[in-house]
């Protein structure tokens, strides 16, 4: 006899209900921010200036940067901007395959500590994403390619699945992520994404005139979006992930 299919989360689940409150993931109080972006600069100067402003804003707000560990492109730009500040702190997370390990593969995760800069080495890309996500309380997406899209959408999905409860802010520099927002809306229209899930991610558009995007303070806008984000507005699926759930409340029956 074939096993019955597993039932999905109830469509009528209300996170404000007693069961929802018991399963709600605690909003993170961690001030560090993960920034996902390209290892290249892109063709528009506005992209590089956006990365610069994000780095400066993080340092000004006393928020450590967690990023992919690269020294080139937008990754190098944002980390360099953070370190220009006396109180700027940077954590770079890199897979061994992307660095010259030279026999140092003695642990799955190794550390290299310099003043205000911590390097974390991991074995796989999956470990990299987990290591970055667990160290931060929010995420910023700058323009990037496949890797950046993958990272951004994964942490949005984790909000939806109740794995974490963290702000995800996408900086739509020069309309770069217009097509992603359109895809989300198409997913809602076609019934693949719940309408209330649109607020799992925040888009920051900047000035209406893209000619002003090069001088716009994207970093300040990103910090404002993070600090304005309402964790209680997230309607996640009622999955109970034991590592993250508030265990002070009894489990739902």
Image: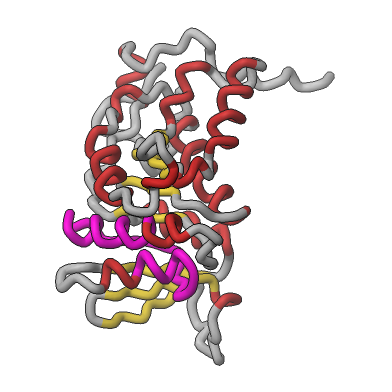
Q: Is residue 164 above or below residue 39?
A: above
Q: Outermost residue, right direction? A: 1
- Which residues lie in the magenta part? 50-79
- Examine the structure image and report whether residue 93 is included in the region drawn in magenta: no
Question: Does residue 127 appear in the picture of this structure?
Answer: no
What is the image's colouring? secondary structure
Which sits in the foreground, 247 or 108?
A: 108
Coordinates of residue 177 in the picture (x, y in percent): 53, 41
Is 197 left or right of 58, judged from the image as shown?
right
Q: Quadrant of the C terminus?
A: top left
Rendering quarter of residue 89: bottom left
Rendering quarter of residue 123: bottom right
Number of callouts:
0
Q: Residue at x 38, y 77 (%)?
A: 111
Q: Is residue 95 above or below residue 195?
A: below
- Examine the structure image and report whether residue 64 is included in the region drawn in magenta: yes
Q: Residue at x 38, y 41 (%)?
A: 169
Is 54 left or right of 132, judged from the image as shown?
left
Coordinates of residue 229 in the picture (x, y in percent): 28, 32
Q: Residue at x 30, y 61 (%)?
A: 55
Q: Residue at x 44, y 43 (%)?
A: 210
Q: Outermost residue, bottom direction? A: 102
Q: Main secondary structure of the magenta part?
A: helix
Rendering quarter of residue 1: top right
Is 118 left or right of 157, judged from the image as shown?
left
Coordinates of residue 102 in the picture (x, y in percent): 55, 91
Which sits in the foreground, 15 or 189?
A: 189
Question: Does residue 92 appear in the picture of this structure?
Answer: yes
Q: Is residue 33 above or below residue 172?
A: below
Coordinates of residue 211 in the picture (x, y in percent): 42, 46
């Amino acid at each position: 006899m074939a096993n019955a299919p597993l039932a999905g989360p109830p469509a009528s689940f209300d996170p404000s209900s007693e069961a929802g409150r018991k399963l709600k993931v605690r909003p993170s109080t961690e001030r560090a921010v993960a920034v996902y972006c390209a290892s290249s600069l892109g063709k528009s100067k506005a992209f590089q200036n956006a990365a610069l402003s994000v780095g400066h804003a993080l340092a000004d707000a006393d928020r450590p940067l967690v990023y992919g560990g690269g020294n080139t492109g937008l990754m190098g730009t944002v980390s360099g901007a953070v370190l220009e500040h006396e109180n700027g702190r940077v954590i770079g997370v890199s897979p061994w395959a992307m660095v010259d390990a030279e026999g140092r593969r003695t642990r799955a995760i190794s550390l290299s500590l310099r003043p205000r800069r911590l390097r974390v080495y991991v074995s796989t890309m999956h470990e990299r994403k987990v290591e970055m996500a667990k160290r931060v309380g929010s995420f910023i997406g700058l323009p990037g390619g496949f890797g950046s899209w993958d990272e951004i959408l994964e942490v949005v999905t984790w909000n939806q699945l109740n794995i974490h409860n963290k702000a995800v802010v996408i900086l739509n520099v020069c309309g770069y992520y217009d097509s992603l927002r359109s895809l989300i809306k198409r997913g809602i229209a076609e019934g693949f994404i719940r309408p209330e899930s649109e607020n799992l991610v925040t888009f920051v558009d900047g000035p209406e005139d893209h000619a002003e995007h090069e001088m716009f303070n994207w970093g300040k806008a990103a910090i404002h979006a993070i600090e304005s984000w309402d964790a209680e507005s997230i309607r996640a699926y009622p999955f109970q992930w034991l590592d993250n759930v508030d265990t002070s409340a009894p489990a739902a029956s």
